[in-house]
Amino acid sequence: MAQGSDSNDTSYTKSPSPGNKQGSSDDMRKVMRREKNRIAAQKSRQRQTQKADSLHLESESLEKENAALRKEVKRLTEEAKYLSMVLSNHESVCTGVNHEQLYGSHAPFHQHINIQHYPL
């Protein structure tokens, strides 16, 4: 800390002459103002530290969530590749299917398709 900023250090204040009430009043106001300023600065630093801590926790949480979402995207991408392969293999076997109906409707696949569920 800078020299003279400690509120317990009275070396920077002049002792007023006993007959000078105005000087004493001004010195008291300065001391009070410095004390208020010191407390305000301390509170500001505490708020800044709390905000940094909060942002750090939020960042860690978002990183974990991001990792979980990336893992899910990878799993779903692999599942989509697997299902595309199954469909491709089936299309080469099944000749009696109107592909517009297959892709355009939500009707179940043919009964003769034997698909094992994608391993999770």
Image: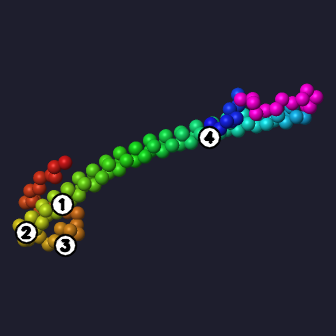
Check contact, mark 2 vs mark 4: CB within 8 A.
Answer: no
Q: Main secondary structure of the magenta part?
A: loop
The tag on residue 44 is: 4
Q: Magenta region: which residues?
A: 9-21
Q: Earlier in the sequence, mark 3 or mark 4?
A: 4
The tag on residue 100 is: 3
14 left or right, relative to 67:
right
Q: Residues within 10 Å of mark 1 (few under 14, many from 20)?
A: few
Give, as a three-letter code, the residue at label 3: Glu
Q: Residues within 10 Å of mark 4 (few under 14, many from 20)?
A: few
Q: Nearer the viewer, mark 3 or mark 1?
A: 1
Give, as a three-letter code, the residue at label 2: Ser
In whole angstroms, how far apart are the C-alphas of marks 2 and 4? 71 Å
102 left or right, relative to 96:
right
Residue drawn at x 20%, y 63% as measured from the top left: 107
Check contact, mark 3 vs mark 1: CB within 8 A.
Answer: no
Q: Residues within 10 Å of mark 3 (few under 14, many from 20)?
A: few
Residue drawn at x 23%, y 63% as measured from the top left: 106
Which is more toward the observer, 109 or 6? 6
Residue 13 counted in the magenta span:
yes
Q: Is residue 47 above or below residue 83?
A: above
In whole angstroms, how far apart are the C-alphas of marks 3 and 4? 67 Å
In whole angstroms, how far apart are the C-alphas of marks 3 and 2? 16 Å
